Image (cartoon, rainbow, N blue to C red):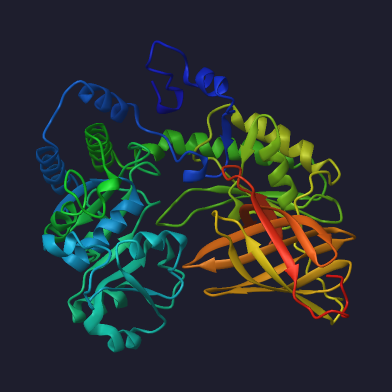
Amino acid sequence: MSIYEVESASGIAPVRALIEEWGIEPLVNCGGVRTRYGGSRTLPEAIAEMETIQNQFVDMDELNVAAGSAMSRLLDVEWGLVTGGASAAITLATAAAIAGRDPFIAMSMPFHCLERSIVALPNGHLSPYDMAITGAGGILVEIGDIDELFAVRDKIALMFFVGLREADGAITFSAWLEAAARFDVPVLVDAASEFLIGPERWTQRGAGLVAYSGAKRIGGPSGAGLLLGRRDLVKAATLHTAPNFGIGRSMKVSREEVVGMLRAVELNAKNGCMLWQPDRELECRGMLESIRLGLCSIEGVRAEVVEGTPALPIPRLRIEWAPSAITRSGPSILAALRDGRPAIVVEEQWVAEHSITIDAFCMQRGEEDVVLRRLVEELESPQKVQVEPISRGNNLRRSESCWTLATYFNSSPRTGRLVFSQGDGPVRGEYVDDDLIAEVQGFRRGAVLNFFLNTEKFGNQIVINFVGAVHGDKATGTATFGRMLPQKNAFLPDLNRDKIRWTAEKLNPAGQDRGL
C-alpha cells in the first residue's frame, strides 16, 4: 500500500469520519509541508514501528543511545538524537553549546550568568524560529560581515546558519565555517525542511550540528525531529531534555516517536527521500501539469511549472493573470479557496497581487481536479471575497490626535500611546509603549474605526486588527490576532485565538478637533 493510500489502522472509525464528527473539515493541502497545515505524511513503515512498541516498555536512556548509534552508522555522523521537532533540536543545540555537560549550568538555563552565550547568525537568516535559541538563553547577534565577529569573538557560543538561505546571503557557508574554526565555535545548520539522505550533507561539509524536522521531508512522526553531528555536543544536548530535567524537558519525545523516527531515517538513508521517490515525483508533476493545462483556456491566465533548487528540488505551479482580464486579486483568491468546501490552502508567502503558487508535495491523487475546478471558478468570477486592506492613505489630513490605548491581553491591560491622523477615510500613525514601537494603519468611516497594529519581534510578525466605535473622546472595541500577507496589504485572522477587548481615550486638550 502506498503512503498516499493509508487508511485508519484502528477498528473504530476512519480518520476522516472522526475529523468530520469533531466539526473539522480536511484540507486540500497545496501549501507544502507547513506545521500550520498539519505538516507532512508519516511513512507506513514508521507507523507500523510505532504501533509495535506501544505495548512494550524500555529504558529511554538505553533507547536514545541505541538510536544515536544507529543514526551514526546510517548517516555517517558522530551521533544523533531524536527531538521534539526541529525547533526543539535548535533549543537543545543552543543549550549544549552554552552549558556543555555541566549539570549545574544546565539547571540554571536560561537564566545563566555566562558571558559566552552569543549565537551569531548572518544577516538575512533571522526568522520567527529563532525563539528556539533565545528561549535557551542564547543572545542573537546578526552579522553583516565576517570581520564583525571579532568584536564579540570571546562571547560566541554557537554560529547559526539557515541551510535553505545559503544561496541568498552575502556570507557564504564556507566563510562561516572558516570563521567558526578560527574561533573554535561549532556551526549549527537549520535544515528543517530539507531532504535527509546518507551521508548527511551538512556535517560532511563541516557543520558541527544540524537540525531536521522529522516529518516535513523525512516521513517520520509529525512531532519529531533530529539533532545530528558532533558526539560531544549531541550527548550534551541529552542533559537538557527528557528523561532528564532540563530546559528541554517539556520537549519530551515518546518511545513511539524514537523508533518511528529511526525507521524513517533508515529508509531515507538507504533509498533516498522516501517522500520523493521517482514515481511520486512523476505523480506530483502530473497533478501540476493537469492544473496547468486546465487553466490555459482562461484568457489572461499564464501558468508554468517552476523548478526547485538543488537543495530542495520540488517543482511548483505558478499561476499569473493580467489584471485587465481577471478582476480578482491573489489574496482574495487565497481567502476564497480557504473558505470554500473543500477548503484548499495555499502558502501565503507564495501569493502576490496577481499570482498564486501551488505545491503538490502533500496533495493526493484526484485532488488536482478539485483544485482546478475551484481555481477556474474563482478566476472567472468577479471580486467577491473581501480581504481587509491596509489603506496607505496618501492624502491624509495633516492634523493628528493622541490617544491612550489599553489592550486587554491579560486581566491587566497593556497601555501605550496612539497617534492617529484625523478625519474620515484612511488613517495612519504609530503606537508606542515602554518596549514597543509599531506602525498603525487603517480607516475611519463615521463612528466605525478599524486599524491594524503591525510590528516584528525577533523576526516574528505580530499583527493585530482593532475594530470598534468612536464616541466623542473615547473608543472601544475588540481586537483579533492574525497574519499579514507579505507585501499584499491583506490581513488573515487567526482562528485559534479569541478576540480581546480594547479601549482608547483621547489626550488632546479641550477645544481641539474631537475627531480621529
The residue at the far front in this view is: 510
On the rendered structure, is 210 left or right of 376? left
503 vs 513: above or below:
above
407 vs 25: above or below:
below
Residue 486 visible in image: no
The residue at the far top in this view is: 11
Between 515 and 325, the residue placed more toward the observer is: 515
Q: Find residue 184 and report its image quarter.
A: bottom left
480 vs 163: above or below:
above
On the rendered structure, is 441 left or right of 109? right
The percent position of residue 249, horizontal first and vertical second, equals 25, 48
The C terminus sits in image quarter: bottom right
At a point 34% along the width and 84% down the height, the residue shown is 146
Between 232 and 299, the residue placed more toward the observer is: 232
The percent position of residue 430, horizontal first and vertical second, equals 68, 74
The percent position of residue 369, horizontal first and vertical second, equals 65, 29
At a point 29% along the width and 46% down the height, the residue shown is 250
At a point 31% along the width and 62% down the height, the residue shown is 189
Residue 425 visible in image: yes
Between 134 and 307, the residue placed more toward the observer is: 134
